[in-house]
Image (tube, helix red, strand yellow):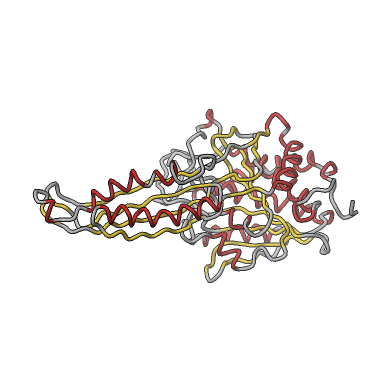
Amino acid sequence: MDAAKIDIAKIDVAKIKSRALSLAEEMTRLRRHFHENPELPWQEMETSRLIASKLEELGLNPQIGVGDQPVGVVADLAGNASGPCVALRADIDAFAITEETDVPYKSCKPGVMHACGHDGHITMLLAAAKLLSEMKDQLPGRVRFIFQPAEEHGYRSGAQAMINDGVLEGVSSIAGMHLWSDIPSGKAQWRAGPTMASADGWKVVFKGKGGHGAAPHVAIDPTLAAAAFIFAVQTLVSRETNPLETVVVSVGKLESGRASNVIPELAEMVGTVRTFNRAVRDGIEERFQRMAEGVGATYRCKAETRYEGLYPYPVVNDAALTRLFRDTAVRVVGEENLGEAPLRMSSEDFSFYQAEIPGCFFFVGSGNEAKGCAAPHHSPHFNIDDDSLPTGVALLTSFACAMLGSKKGEIEG
Ligand code: NI
């Protein structure tokens, strides 16, 4: 084994854990500050400034901004220059929802809330940067800290923008994590291969001919086509996809008409498609348009469709890197607190990084019923258990060390 490599058995996990624990109070304060001051996707200006100032305190040279937007922060920690560069990524944006908790650090902005735990992600990555900075002389390579905006945006992914900006240049592997409210605080989960779904958005407008509800024969009823399409589109799942694959097609909104006795001109629907397999996802896109046009034609309507890949790649964890994570994590949280994650149909734009380089996305429990931290993500009652933060920091820090000891996510032996 190369002398510069870290043998994961030699990573001083006990020291990393105790340093992470010693930052608990400071992290709780900072996490609550971010929670109280949330910013929507692509508007994370204050958040980015505070992240950068914290990184400067560590002696790093953070760069703010992605593309022409003044949000998002990247900083490199240089250990041994000849070693590999690995990346740790946190998402930093909040969600468009009004908070309904009664915590003293409740969001100060109506309609904006850290309802997904990204306030915790920022805090943990800053603390991991601190711990890794303290051990930089022993690091056999570089660590890039990526504070990514706009994970929740959907149509304009922050991950894609950062990749376009070159954030992965020279990076051999990347790790990301999500706090998860249905996993108890103190526990963690890993999963190899497909882990979270791709997410597409679609829209169909059926165009008919308006008329009186009492004379349908002289009108063309687009609501009928829409109703037929709602049923028909499910056969893309049940009749046109291999039953061993997983696909969800959902209609989220249907709008047509305003009055009880009027046949409207238009019926409009929007929805989502989720799957774990890129080929399956591409197949659905093709068939979707054919079905909308066919159903429209059956009922004399014209169908206009739009099909957009929001997060067109599923989150797929590199097998070797995930094994490395599991072997590291078992030393951090113990076998009894580590489990295999179930497949999740929710999506994450971490998948964009994984389409470029090997990546591992893992889950850290933030749930604690007794502390009122059990509401699902994106709920107005969502909150995290701050005691979960040291666990996440110890995992991020230890895993960064482990990744530096392995080339391109591969483990020796
Ligand atoms: Ni999230």
Which part of the image, by quadrant, shows the C terminus? top right
Please tell me whether residue 200 is drawn above or below residue 243 in the rendered image: below
Residue 247 image point, x, y percent: 48, 44
**Residue 322 vertical position relative to residue 148 in the rendered view, above or below:** above
Residue at 65% from the left image edge and 64% from the top image edge = 167
In this view, the residue farthest toward the bottom is 68
Query: Relative to 406, is 154 on the left or the right?
Result: left
188 to the left or right of 237: right
Q: How many discs mark residues in the rendered view? A: 0
Answer yes or no: is residue 394 visible. no
Residue drawn where x is 71% and y is 61% of the image? 171
Vertical relation: 407 (above or below) 167 = above
Determine which quarter of the picture holds residue 304.
bottom left
Where residue 204 appears, as percent x and y from the top left, is: 33, 56
Of residues 49 and 358, which is closer to you in this image? 358
On the question of residue 365 being in view, the answer is: yes
Residue 62, position as x, y percentages in the image: 66, 64
In this rendered view, identify the residue nearer to me: 370 or 146. 146
Task: Using residue 350 as the reference point, say whether residue 301 is left or right of it.
Answer: left
Residue ID at (59%, 67%)? 164
Q: Position of residue 207 (x, y in %)?
A: 25, 59
